[in-house]
Amino acid sequence: MRQVAIVGVGYSGFRSITPDLSYKELMYEAAAKAYEDAGVDPRRDVESFVSVAEDFNEGTSIFDEYVPDQIGGVLKPVHTIAGDGIHGLIAAYMQVLTGAMDIVMVEAHSKASNVLTLSDVVAYAMDPVYNRPLRANPLFIAGMEMNRYLYKTGTTEEQCAQVVVKNRANGFLNPSAAYGASLSLDAVLSSEPLSHPLKRLEVSSHADGAIVMVLASGDVAQELSALPIWIMGVGWCNETPSLETRDWESATYARNSARMAYRLAGIRNPRLEIDFAEVDDTFAYKELQHMEALGLCREGEAGLLVEEGTTELDGELPLNPSGGSLGVGHLLDASGLARVLEVVLQLRGEAGQRQLEDVETGLAFGWRSIPTTSGAAVVLSI
Amino acid sequence: MSANVENFPGTPLSQADFDEGKILTTHWKPKLEYGWDAGVAISRYLAELKNGRIIGIKCSRCRSTVVPPRVVCEWCWEPMDDWVYLKDTGTVNTFSICYIRWDASRAKEPQIPAVIEIDGASKGAGILHLLDEVNADDVTIGMKVQAVWKPADERTGAITDIRYFKPT
Ligand SMILES: [Zn+2]
């Protein structure tokens, strides 16, 4: 199989609001930085363009029409994926794998601040016949899942809150994070309940931003970059959409995504072979649940590990050194690509104050948030 | 006609079946509101419309002048910041005579949407607007037109600050 690497990254943001730039200008800024980083000219070198967008988040039907000019894709192969940023990355990866393309870009963005009825948009993701007429705020889905996860594994509310303390502290060391903060465990635990047992500070806040990555095939990647970041394996999985019959305990979609990615990457023991990970933490308990599902520890063990500091920057298995969605901000469907971005920066040794030591292999995992069971994973190595 | 149609003719539906609730449907009225940040290029464009002027932007590499303005040239990926005021006159590139309204109802008086290549912009660069003060039958491709503006105190910084274009 062809080898594929990430040879350029660029991003714009991440901030709670971006009134100075249109979404097109936000995307342009990220794209210009990524092309500069990769040393490519999009008009001459980039053969295909993948954009990640969901029409309801954009407020424009058939959003792919609004994409090509600001990413340099006019008169070239362009298409849009309604999925997580990692789904988009995988689509770009597979285009290179075909052998038809050598240089492909992927873009994902969030202008969450421009969606004035964002909670309604989330509500439209619920089944219109069975669930939506009950008119419950969809956050109850996170509350129900957290409740069952704690019940099944014995994980405590304190351990979930510790994830918030860790990730927002990591965000402090990340200049592009919108929500870095020094919080006490008590502050998190005493923040108001949103949907029991989920508390306000355990829910990531939205941010605006755009992320662009340039992918290249083996030889081309070697030519372009002194330090290509190789895509070793990818995986993705959707569980049942039904709230009535899904697995509420253990994020099966994450387990299956990771299994596929590990198989392709030749990883037999992720606990030993993955040096660090960026995993979806849209809600604090999700980092723990995903950590277990991704095989980074045993079931029921994640809470203990966060308590013991194992997942902190100086721990044995750092999780979300970027700050995750809790620290960086939730970037709608760009969130997964933000996870990948941090893995790339860490592997390149470009993560500044939060740089991890001796990291060679990292995992990124994205989830499309409530009410979905839609996940995607990628394993990256130097 | 296949024999199955005779054997299994099906059950006909009438409008009354729907009206009387015999056929179950489910409804949802979306609440979707957006407040898009106009950003650098569109903000300047709208601000100049409020001033009663059309502004474009020029690419320093390929020399094309485009309207509405944008921050990057879509042809050569050059950042653009060379603002140029354009005339409020132009040439009809293409048009249609539209007998159905925005909501798909039948219009008594047709609307005439047109792409107008603005004088001073590059060939092929124009804005979409409506034509008026002209008989639909008299509109031609290549016709010279000019903007009819709202009075200054009614302009809000929107494309509708130009009411329509009319023949010169
Ligand atoms: Zn140009």
Image (tube, helix red, strand yellow):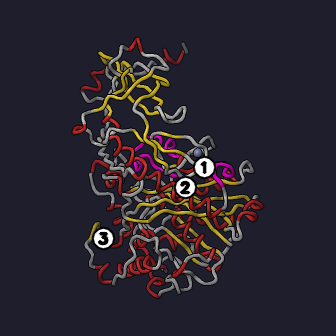
**Amino acid type assigned to the residue bearing label 3 in the image:** Arg
Q: Residue at x 54, y 52 (%)?
A: B79
Residue A46: in magenta span: yes
The CA span between labels 1 and 2 is 8 Å
State which region is magenta: A41-67
**Amino acid type assigned to the residue bearing label 1 in the image:** Phe
Please state the chain letter of the residue tagged with numbered disc 1 in the rendered image.
A
Same chain for labels 1 and 2? Say yes or no. Answer: yes
| Disc 1 target residue | A49
Task: Find out whether the residues at labels 1 and 2 contact each other: C-beta distance under 8 Å.
Answer: yes
| Disc 3 target residue | A200
The CA span between labels 1 and 3 is 38 Å
Work out which quarter of the rendered image holds the N terminus of chain B and state it.
Answer: top right
| Disc 2 target residue | A107
Front label number (1 vs 3):
1
Place of residue B90 in the rendered image (x, y in percent of width and height, measured from the top left): 44, 28
Above or below for B159 versus A143: above
Q: Residues within 10 Å of mark 3 (few under 14, many from 20)?
A: some
Q: Secondary structure at mark 2?
A: strand
Q: Give whichever of discs 3 and 2 has the lower sequence position.
A: 2
- A293 left or right of A183 in image: right
Task: Find out whether the residues at labels 3 and 2 contact each other: C-beta distance under 8 Å.
Answer: no
Above or below for A166 versus A76: below
